[in-house]
Image (cartoon, rainbow, N blue to C red):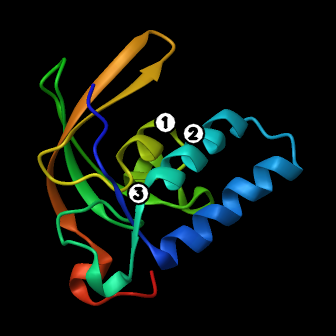
């Protein structure tokens, strides 16, 4: 699959790099996911919060996704690990799906590996992006 350019804000980058660095210091069960996140961040175009396009998935964005294989829609908010709560629709950035969608845009199709093979989702809508609403501190 073609590799898309992804966008990450400077503010998100600082906080996400902190998570990746933490994984180097500790043995944690999410170590591989954090390594993948580090790889994604390394290839990202870094932008100021005020300059990120409004159709890009950033931290604390609420997104509607379409599972291409099952045609199921899902809505969730991309959050930091300490805020993750499946019952509230909050998915951690270090969950495989969270790492997979950070920085992608509406209309992009994203694939990632799971134990059973590969999953493919399409980013349908961004229902809320903090930067688009002037919420630069989230």
Rendering coords of residue 115 (x, y %): 51, 13
Residue sitting at 28 percent across and 61 percent down? 62
Q: Secondary structure at mark 3?
A: strand
Q: Name the image quarter holding residue 67.
A: top left
Residue sitting at 37 percent across and 16 percent down? 118
Q: CA distance from mark 3 to mark 1?
A: 11 Å
Rendering coords of residue 85 (x, y %): 50, 52
Q: CA distance from mark 1 to mark 2?
A: 9 Å
Q: Are marks 1 and 2 in contact (CB under 8 Å)?
A: yes
Residue at the spot of label 3: 78
Q: Is residue 35 left or right of residue 88?
A: right
Residue sitting at 24 percent across and 32 percent down? 121
- Sequence-first tag of 2 and 3: 2
- Sequence-first tag of 3 and 1: 3
Q: Is residue 97 left or right of residue 37?
A: left
For residue 47, above or below residue 22:
below
Rendering coords of residue 78 (x, y %): 40, 57
Residue at the spot of label 2: 36
Residue at the spot of label 1: 96
Q: Is residue 76 left or right of residue 127?
A: right
Return the residue found at the far top. Answer: 116
- Sequence-first tag of 1 and 2: 2
Q: Quadrant of the C terminus?
A: bottom left
For residue 63, above or below residue 48:
above
Residue sitting at 30 percent across and 59 percent down? 57
Q: Are marks 2 and 3 in contact (CB under 8 Å)?
A: no
């Amino acid at each position: 699959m073609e590799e898309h350019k992804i966008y990450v804000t400077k503010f998100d980058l600082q906080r996400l790099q902190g998570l990746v660095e933490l994984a180097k210091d500790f043995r944690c069960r999410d170590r591989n996911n954090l390594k993948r996140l580090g790889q994604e961040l390394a290839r990202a175009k870094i932008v100021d919060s005020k300059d990120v396009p409004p159709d890009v998935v950033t931290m604390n964005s609420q997104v509607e996704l379409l599972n291409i294989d099952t045609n199921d829609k899902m809505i969730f908010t991309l959050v930091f690990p300490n805020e993750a709560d499946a019952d509230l629709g909050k998915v951690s950035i270090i969950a495989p799906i969270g790492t997979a969608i950070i920085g992608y845009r509406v209309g992009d199709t994203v694939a990632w590996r799971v134990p059973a093979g590969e999953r493919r989702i399409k980013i349908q809508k961004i229902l809320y992006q903090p930067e688009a609403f002037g919420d630069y501190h989230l």
